[in-house]
Image (tube, rainbow, N blue to C red):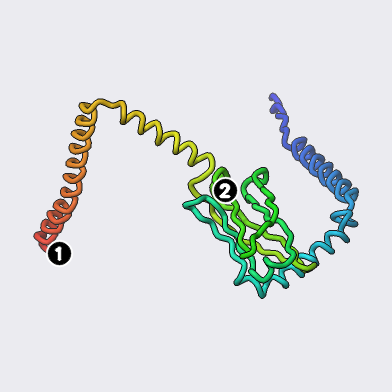
């Protein structure tokens, strides 16, 4: 009588290898975590704390003036109007305007603050990328700092409008060089397309009314 052949099963070795790998990974992670420095997040934490407190003071000083500080975008002229209180404009004022682009830091721009006697400054943004921008004003009057932040949306300007202008000029040149017979054919096609669209629109209500009539004619169960 032949003895049954013993089959070799790899599962015990696989389980041992898994536990060995998991233990090695856990030990390595613990050694890595213990070796990390956790004393300070930044070496200049004291300067950062001072700047943070200065920012809080700027916000508190700006709070009573928020109704007099406005930032608006003029889409027709592609410019941003910045208006500060007139009482501050006639005094010694200095600062900057930061245009912050949340989606692309490379597009951020800094503009010196230079308002006129009425407290108005106009920044032209015709060549800027359209989309969401945050306008951050930082200015100082007689040693007192102020801060104001507002979001604007720049639309239809920059590279997009430039491409659209090129396309529009190309269409104008094409229509100027196009013979009258081609315009007649285009009007004919447009008229046929309009007629087909109106036919489809008229078929819809008639089908719905026919379905209602047929449903009403069915005997109720």
Q: Nearer the viewer, mark 1 or mark 2?
A: 2
Label pair 1/2, CB-CB below 8 angstroms: no
Image position of 135 with respect to 18: above or below? below
Residue 69 x/y as whole percent: 62, 67
Classify mark 2: residues with Cα within 10 Å, few (<14), some (14-19) or many (20+): some
Residue in view at x 68 percent, y 57 percent: 114
Residue 17 higher or lower than 76, as above or below: above
Which one is earlier in the sequence, the residue at label 1 or at label 2? Answer: 2
Mark 1 nearby-residue class (10 Å; few <14, some 14–19, many ≥20) = few
**Image coords of residue 135 (percent x, y):** 63, 57
Picture layout, residue 49 above or below residue 211: below
Say which quadrant the N terminus sits in: top right
Point out which mark residue 125 bears: 2
User: What secondary structure is found at the residue carrying circle 1?
Assistant: loop
The percent position of residue 17, horizontal first and vertical second, equals 79, 37
Q: Is residue 195 visible?
A: yes
**Image quadrant occupied by the C terminus:** bottom left
- Is residue 4 rendered to the left or right of residue 25? left
Residue denoted by label 1:
221
At a point 61% along the width and 65% down the height, the residue shown is 118
**Secondary structure state at the residue bearing disc 2:** loop
**Residue at the image position 67 percent from the left and 46 percent from the top:** 105
In the foreground, 48 or 136:
136
Report the front residue among 24 and 60: 60
Regarding residue 56, the answer to whether it shows in the image is no
Question: Which image quadrant is residue 208 in?
Answer: bottom left
**How many numbered marks appear?**
2
Q: Is residue 137 above or below residue 163?
A: below
Q: Quadrant of residue 82?
A: bottom right
Please tell me which residue lies in front, 165 or 185: 165
């Amino acid at each position: 009588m032949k003895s049954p052949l013993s089959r070799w099963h790899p599962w015990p070795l696989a389980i041992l290898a898994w536990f060995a790998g998991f233990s090695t990974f856990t030990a390595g992670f613990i050694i890595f975590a213990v070796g990390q420095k956790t004393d300070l997040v930044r070496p200049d934490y004291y300067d950062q704390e001072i700047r943070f407190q200065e920012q809080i003071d700027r916000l508190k000083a700006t709070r009573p003036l928020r109704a007099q500080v406005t930032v608006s975008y003029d889409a027709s002229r592609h410019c941003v109007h910045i208006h500060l209180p007139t009482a501050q404009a006639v005094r010694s004022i200095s600062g900057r305007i930061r245009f912050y682009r949340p989606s692309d830091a490379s597009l951020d721009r800094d503009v010196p603050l230079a308002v006129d006697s009425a407290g108005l400054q106009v920044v032209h943004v015709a060549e800027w990328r359209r989309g969401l921008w945050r306008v951050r004003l930082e200015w100082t009057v007689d040693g007192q700092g102020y801060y104001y932040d507002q979001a604007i949306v720049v639309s239809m300007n920059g590279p997009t409008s430039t491409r659209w202008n090129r396309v529009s000029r190309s269409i104008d040149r094409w229509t100027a060089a196009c013979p009258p017979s081609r315009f007649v054919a285009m009007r004919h096609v447009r008229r046929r397309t309009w007629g087909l669209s109106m036919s489809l629109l008229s078929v819809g209500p008639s089908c719905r009314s026919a379905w209602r009539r047929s449903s009403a004619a069915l005997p109720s169960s």
